Amino acid sequence: MEAKQAAGTEAARYVESGMKLGLGTGSTVYWTIRELGRRVREEGLRVEAVPTSLETEKLARQEGIPLIAPREVAGRLDLAIDGADEVDPALRLIKGGGGALLREKLIAANAERFIVTADSSKCVEKLGRFPLPVEVVPFAWEWTQRRLELLGGTSRLRLTKDSGEEPYRTDNGNYVLDCAFGEISDPAAMNRSLLEIPGVVENGLFIGLAERAVIGYTDGSTKTLRAEKL
Ligand SMILES: O=C[C@H](O)[C@H](O)[C@H](O)COP(=O)(O)O
């Protein structure tokens, strides 16, 4: 079994009937959604879910998982499950490789519990090897880029995979700048600095949100980690 499949499937075990869920985006949580679909169909699992992207919405519909709009959720979601591009020992994350960071952060921040699921290649001692995705408004994005780079790195406007020339647009119609800052020594401070820049909508640093991480290995085994205090 592939590591992502092992991790994603294992993470689905935290889901119980009656829960309102946040469903993440990407090739790991894909397996969580597949497993939840199986349980809905075969075991009568009753859940309602808010998807973090149009891609996940489509998959959840195919799997027969009932969807709800955020406005229909009184209070917080019970549980959100999502993948990550990097996970450090304090379970701080870099996310947004698939461009879904804004909805993902909104959903993680509005869930009682947030579980991250990833294969072991995503585990790092320090965040920053993976370029940090920053969602920016298209208007004057070059100015925003300049301000971002003053924080000490370089950045690239993400382009569409198909044409390779058109700027990629998120589900919210924004652009993404992939920022290489190198090792991020203080992720919380970096998060604050990024959010102070006009034009920045959100960034892929998820801090203090994940309560546990379900990590998958190539032999099909999994490990569940709790955040280490750093
Ligand atoms: O925008 C995308 C998300 O943050 C994904 O959860 C993240 O990129 C991990 O994706 P994958 O599980 O495909 O590696």
Image (spheres, grey):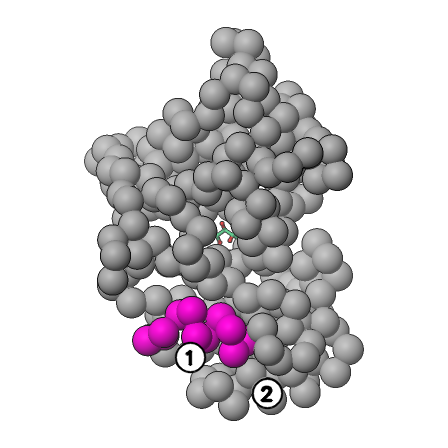
Tell me the quarter of the picture where residue 177 sits: bottom right
Magenta stretch, residue numbers: 184-194
How far is mark 2 from mark 1, CA to CA?
13 Å
The residue sitting at the top extreme is: 43
Task: Please identify the quadrant where the C terminus is shown.
Answer: bottom left
Residue closer to the observer: 218 or 33: 33
Provide the secondary structure element on which disc 2 rests. helix
The residue at label 1 has a CB less than 8 Å from ligand 1: no
Task: Look at mark 2 in the image and give the residue it sits on.
Answer: 147
Work out which quarter of the rendered image holds the N terminus and state it.
top left
Residue linked to disc 1: 181
* Horizontal and vertical percent position of residue 183: 33, 75
Number of the front mark, 2 or 1: 2
State the image coordinates of residue 226 (x, y, percent, origin top left). Answer: 28, 44
Tell me if I can see residue 185 in this picture.
yes
Residue type at mark 2?
Arg
Please give the name of the residue rendered at 38% of the width and 44% of the height, measured from the top-left corner.
211
Q: Is residue 180 above or below residue 53?
A: below
Q: Is residue 101 magenta?
A: no
Q: Position of residue 45 (x, y in %)?
A: 54, 15
The kind of secondary structure the magenta stretch mainly shows is helix
